[in-house]
Amino acid sequence: MKSTFEEMGGNYRREGDYLIPNLALPEEPEYQIGKYGRIRRSYLKEHRPILYANLLTSGTLHRHLAEIDQACNERMEIIVSAMAKQEGVTEALKSADQMEWVR
C-alpha cells in the first residue's frame, strides 16, 4: 500500500531503520537583495512567520524580497529628488557653497 506522499510522486530513502522522505526546496534564481529586502526578510521572520515559511517553501522568497527592494529603491529616488527640488538643492549649489549644500 502506497502512502499519500508516494502517490503524489515522492519517494523515500532508508536511514537505518527509518524511511526518510526525499524533500528538496525548489531551485530559485539568484537575486541581488539590498537593504530594504533584508529589512523585509527580518520583518517577515519576526512578525509574519507563516507567510515567510510559505514564501520560502514555494521558492518565491528571494524574488519577493528583490521586488520589495526594487520598489523601495525607486520610491526613495522619487522622494529624494522631490525633497531636493523643494529645498532648492542642486549640483550648482554643491560646487558653489558646500556648507549650504549639506545644511
Image: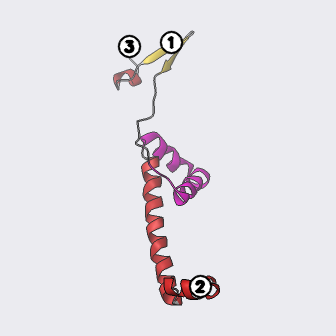
Give the foreground label among 2 and 1.
2
Q: Mark 3 points at which residue?
A: 1
Q: What element carries label 3?
A: loop
Point out the tag, 2 or 3, that comes first from the N-terminus.
3
3D distance between C-alphas at marks 2 and 3: 76 Å
Q: Where is residue 12 in the image (x, y as percent from the top left)?
A: 45, 17
Q: Of marks 1 and 3, which one's residue comes earlier in the chain?
A: 3
Q: Residue 42: x, y in percent?
A: 59, 53
Q: Residue at x 54, y 87 (%)?
A: 93
**Front label number (2 vs 3):** 2
- Residue at point 62%, 88% (across, down): 100
Q: How far across and how far down the image is residue 36, in percent?
A: 53, 60
Magenta residues, as a range?
A: 31-59
Question: With respect to residue 94, does 60 lie above or below?
Answer: above
Residue drawn at point x = 57 percent, y = 9 percent: 16
Given the image, on which type of amino acid does mark 2 rest?
Trp
Q: Residue furthest front?
A: 96
Q: What residue type is labelled 1?
A: Arg
Q: What label sits on residue 14 in the rendered view?
A: 1
**In this figure, which residue is indicated by the disc labeled 2?**
101
Look at label 3 and name its amino acid.
Met
3D distance between C-alphas at marks 2 and 1: 68 Å
Point out residue 97 in the picture as x, y percentages from the top left corner: 60, 88
Find out whether residue 57 is within the magenta segment: yes
Q: Residues within 10 Å of mark 2 (few under 14, many from 20)?
A: some
Q: In which quarter of the image is the C terminus?
A: bottom right
Q: How crowded is mark 1: few (under 14 residues within 10 Å), some or many (20 or more)?
A: few
27, above or below 96, in the image? above
Dot placed on the residue nearer the N-terminal end, 2 or 1: 1
